[in-house]
Amino acid sequence: MASDSEFDDDDDEILLALEQVRSRQDTRDGTPSTSLSGTANGNKTDDLQTKSRVLDVENTIYRTQGEISILRAQLDLLQRQKHDEIKQLVDAQEASKLRDEEKMQALKFTIQRLEDEKRFLNNEVRNLASFKRRRVDSGRSEDLSTTTESPVSKVSRSSGTQSHSETSENSSRSVLAQRVIKIQNDSSLFTDHIWSHCINGSRRSTLKYLSKICLDDDIHFDGFKVNAKMPVSTAITEYLMLKKSLRLDDLISDFCITLCTFVQVLVSRKSVLAVPFVISLIHGALSFRSSAVSRDLIKKLLTSLCTIVSDSVFLLDSTQDENDIVNYHDVPRQVMVLEKFALICALDTVEKLMVIASQFDQSFIKSLWDEDYLSLNLLRSCLPENTERFRNVSQINIMFNFIEILASSLTESGFAYNNVKSKASNESIINSLLKIFLIELPIKEDFMFYGLNRVVGNNFDFDKIESIIPATETILKHSMISIPGPMADDVLEEKGFMRQDITGGSENPSSESHLCFELSKLHEIHLLHLRLKVTSLLESYVITHLSTKVLESKECLKSIIRTIGLEQNFIMKLPRSDTVPMRIQIIASLVRLVSYICSESRGITGLIYPETLYEIYIVFSRIAFGSNSLSVEAHNFLRRIRNNGFYQPVFNASCEIKAREINHVTYSDPKVLGNSLADIESDFPNGLEFSYENETVEIAREILDQCLTREEADNLYFNMNHDEGKFDEMDLVVD
């Protein structure tokens, strides 16, 4: 009983709690059932609404996409129409621009022609007015003089004096009126230029030579008339007078083409006497004003002149063709001299044409080679690669012509003949050019002329031309000749002495040996100028073409190194020669070429023969270590001499004169002291005391650095700069 009373209250509380819990669970279980049923009904309606909305959205999207496609198509159509309109407008603008430019050029041409005509008419008016003034003044002076001389009664002495003063005044006015202003138009200037034209080294003008030359038959073509027994100069002068009203470019073109046709007629008739002089007049006309020379004129003249040259190339080596020997064994000596001189004049004119052509664009230069206006076979025949043929054919004037032609034909892609189908390889041309350094070009008989482009070398054979065309009368009392006259005996005799002296079989007195020495000296200077031109051509080729592959052959490098060594040997044998400056320039240019090859190929040892490497050590060591104590002592010695007032040449006269010319210094300049003059003369290299330029020395050291190790370079330096009086570390070891 006690236990029941103890737990009654607790059980009631538990029961109450249990009932509350059950009631809560019932309410929880009842609520979800009702909510699920309601939600299911609502979801069905929502699904229907959603489906309808989705369908509406899809329909809207489809409509929108269709509209977008239509708009894009319309936009593309508009853009195409816009592009077409822009293209049409641009084409119309370009067409109108071209038409305007053509009209502008036509107007400029018309204005220029009208200005020329106006200038010509003004000159004619001035000329006629001055002529009329002279006639009026002379008429007045005559009237006054007759009036004073007629008997007049009661004339006092004073009136006679007054009339005399009036007469003298009128005569002075007439003298002043006769000083006509010279007509300075282009035609008159061109005529004066032709009248005064002279061949280099000649004693007479070209027209004076032609005034002594006539023809046996008449020649008439295109308004140019040369009658028989009529001076050729008269026909040329009359033709100039007929064409003086032309514009300058038309005048030069007509004049050159007419004379070139005249030369072709003379060559076809084998009348060679006037040919070199007429060709020299063509050269003079081209030299008057190069800007007035047209492209068509260049092409026409090249075609004609190259044909003449090709027919005369055998004169360089008559042994190359037996037919030529047979045809020329009975040709007089004077005719051979004229033909050789005509060949030199023709090639000088071809060179002049190519130099003028270089002022146009590169495509024009290439077209001259591509269209065979300038024959490549002619170049190969005068610059052969074969050594024996090179010795037989080589003539220094002809070589100079073709070096200048190649320099004018240089383009960014190489020489302009590279596009020719039967093209010559650049390697063969370069090998031929390098032979000029290694093979001595001989003095060819009857080829010693200055030519038309340069005054360098010998002009000994021009005396033969002077003797062929007499200045006054012939032996037969003729004032003109139609065939070449015989050469004077003294010229032939002097020529015979010279030829024997050069060949080494002379038994002549010492007076003739001086002539031989002078000719050899002038020929040597001419040859050095040619070699300098070759080095500048090779440098221009490398710089323009931006490649040295054509010079990277072993034979080419061997020739370059050997050439440097030969020039150094000559300087060491004759350090006081006046040709030393040119030889130093040749060495410097060739050293730069080797430097270009080293910089592009990143080394030179793999491009040369083993024996050539030894030559490189010797050749470049002479340059790299040439500035030693001798230079310092020579500089101090030169300072002492100049400070003492001695201004005569000390080491090399030509080098010291050249140094003063470059710095615009003379001995009489009071501002130049002895030390300054010595410094100026010491800066110019002479190959011995002041060996080479600083740039050449630095380049030589860079090349040696690529060929030598550091130890080899040190040993080489000590061996090249060893002095007996200096301290040596090995002396300590020996002690």
Image (spheres, helix red, strand yellow):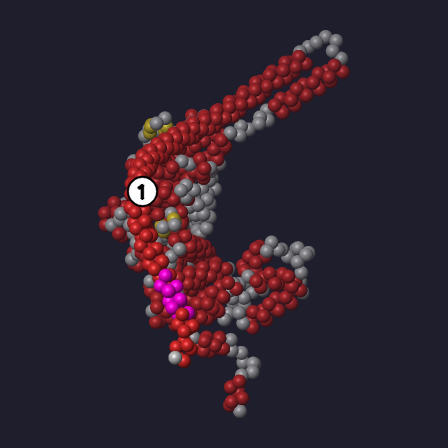
Whole-percent x, y for residue 514 in the image: 46, 57
Residue 490 drawn at (x, y percent) = 42, 48
- Say which amino acid is labelled 1: Gln
Left or right relative to 216: residue 705 = right
Q: Residue at x 40, y 36 (%)?
A: 294
Query: Does 110 sit above or below residue 605?
Result: above
Left or right of residue 303, residue 675 in this image: right
Span colored in magenta: 13-23
Q: Main secondary structure of the magenta part?
A: helix
The foreground one among 654 and 95 is: 95
Residue 385 picture location, percent across and down:
30, 56
The residue indicated by pointer 1 is 49
Label 1, secondary structure: give it. helix
Residue 448, image x and y in percent? 40, 50
Q: In which image quadrant can residue 452 be found?
A: top left
Image point 34% across, 44% down: which residue?
A: 366
